[in-house]
Image: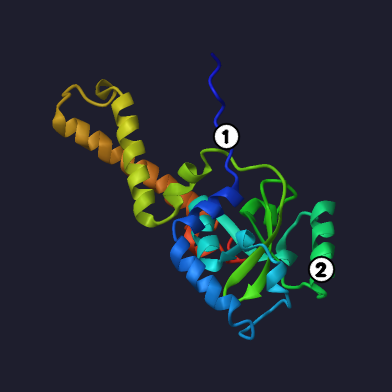
Amino acid sequence: MKMKLIQRTNIESALKKKRSSTYEEHNSNLENFIGNLNISIINNFDFNKLSKARIYHIDHIKKVSIDYRLRFLDIKYFKNKLPIEATNIIKKLEKNHKTKLSEFKIMAPSVLFRLEKKDDPLLFVPIGNDYYYLVHKWGNDLHPFRKALMWPFKNIWNLLLTVLVLSWFLTELTPLSLFTKNQNDSSYWMLLFFMFKAIASIVLYFGFALGKNFNPAIWDNRYNKA
């Protein structure tokens, strides 16, 4: 029997999962928002024609962006062209709602704001009060381990723990006899400390040299290289 291949990550599904974890609070806020349509509406939608399943709060977008190290930026910073399907959906929405949509946002990996690639971008349009409507998703799903691979970059403590674990792993693989004839606990801890300092130095050097930052600092920052 063949093993089932690990599925790639669908960001829209990750958003739905994040929203469902706060369903009651989100649903209550959404009902209040729809009941007060005169409050800071950016795009003039007919809310009776919108799909509630495609409405997300900025908090859901932010949390998923941080988890997967994604950006949420204005469409003008997006280096790829919108696919014809997205353009058709926009035209259909504008026709059905008798309005002209504006202030589009793209949620995608940082590289899509620098290079032309096709890794799972999502097109949103603001509808007011920190809510966004998902217009279209296209491209390839993300690597199945992206969330785990991006975990060290969520904050300094995650990064330090990752460096420590990697240092321990390399220490376990390295024969103490290469460094000393006295293979005791003190020698082991000295080697572990050396590994930690070496890896931490490399991480810090490339972090500063490449202008990298942690996920919470870059998700909506158009200036950081990420």
Q: In the rendering, at what x and y percent does residue 192 appear?
A: 26, 36
Could you classify mark 2 by the number of other residues whose Cα lies within 10 Å: few (under 14), some (14-19), or many (20 or more)? few
> Quadrant location of the C terminus?
bottom right
As shown in the figure, which amino acid type bears the numbered disc 2? Asn
Residues at marks 1 and 2, CA–CA distance in whole angstroms: 35 Å
Q: Residues within 10 Å of mark 1 (few under 14, many from 20)?
A: few
Secondary element at tag 2: helix
> In terms of secondary structure, where does tag 1 sit?
loop
Task: Please give left or right for residue 187 compared with residue 226 in the image.
Answer: left
Query: Residue 29: horizontal and vertical position, in percent?
Result: 50, 73
Contact, mark 1 vs mark 2 (Cβ under 8 Å): no
Q: Is residue 212 visible?
A: no
Q: Which mark is residue 206?
A: none
Residue 173 can be seen in this image: yes
Task: Look at the image and tell me in which quarter the N terminus lies.
Answer: top right
Q: Tell me which amino acid carries mark 1.
A: Gln
Residue reaching furthest to the top: 1
Residue that label 2 marks: 96
Name the foreground residue: 213 vs 119.
119
Q: Going 72% across and 72% down the picture, which residue do you hit?
A: 103
Q: Nearer the viewer, residue 189 or 59?
A: 59
Earlier residue among tags 1 and 2: 1
Left or right: residue 166 versus residue 82 is left
Query: Which residue has dot 1 on it?
Result: 7
Residue at 71 percent of width and 64 percent of height: 77
Residue occupying image coordinates x 44% and y 61%: 22
Please name the residue shown 44% across and 67% down the image.
Answer: 25
Give x and y (percent) for residue 88.
84, 58
Image check: 223 left or right of 190?
right
Q: Position of residue 114 (x, y in %)?
A: 70, 55
